[in-house]
Image (cartoon, helix red, strand yellow):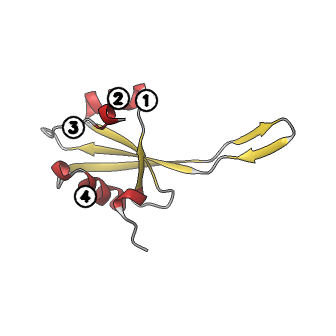
Amino acid sequence: MKRSPHQVLRKPIITEKSVDLKDMARTLCFQVHARASKGEVKQAVEEMFVELRDKVESVHTASFRGKVRRRGKTQGRRSDWKKAYVKLRAGTKVPEYAETV
């Protein structure tokens, strides 16, 4: 099943670590669909950010299990999620998506 770029890239992850990665290592961090492959992530980034077409060097992913949370006697579970690190080629201008949030 083909997913649209908006389904693959859920939201950018904006933390101190991800901003440092963006500034120092030209690496963008995104929360992505749990079943998205590295190829789908690369294609989605190139489609969503037109200025990055053919400028993605590599994609690394990390999967996380959802935590069990409790409120009194009621117990619930957060959903599983996946993070993608998208590294851009040298000389590429990094988009400033953090300013628009």
- Find disc 1 in the rendering and name its residue: 15
Instruction: Categorize mark 3 by other alpha carbons within 10 Å: few (<14), some (14-19), many (20+).
Output: some
Comes first in the chain, label 3 or label 4 = 4
Where is residue 7 shown, x and y percent of the image? 42, 59
Tags 2 and 1 touching, CB below 8 Å: yes
Element carrying mark 4:
helix
- Find disc 4 in the rendering and name its residue: 47
Above or below, comparing residue 37 to residue 2 in the picture: above
Q: Residue furthest front?
A: 100
Q: Distance between the residues labelled 2 and 1?
A: 6 Å
Tags 1 and 3 touching, CB below 8 Å: no
Looking at the rendered structure, the kind of residue marked 3 is Val
Whether residue 25 sits left or right of residue 62 in the image: it is: left
Element carrying mark 1:
loop
Above or below, comparing residue 91 to residue 45 in the picture: above
Which residue is depicted at the point 75% across and 46% down?
76
- Find disc 2 in the rendering and name its residue: 19
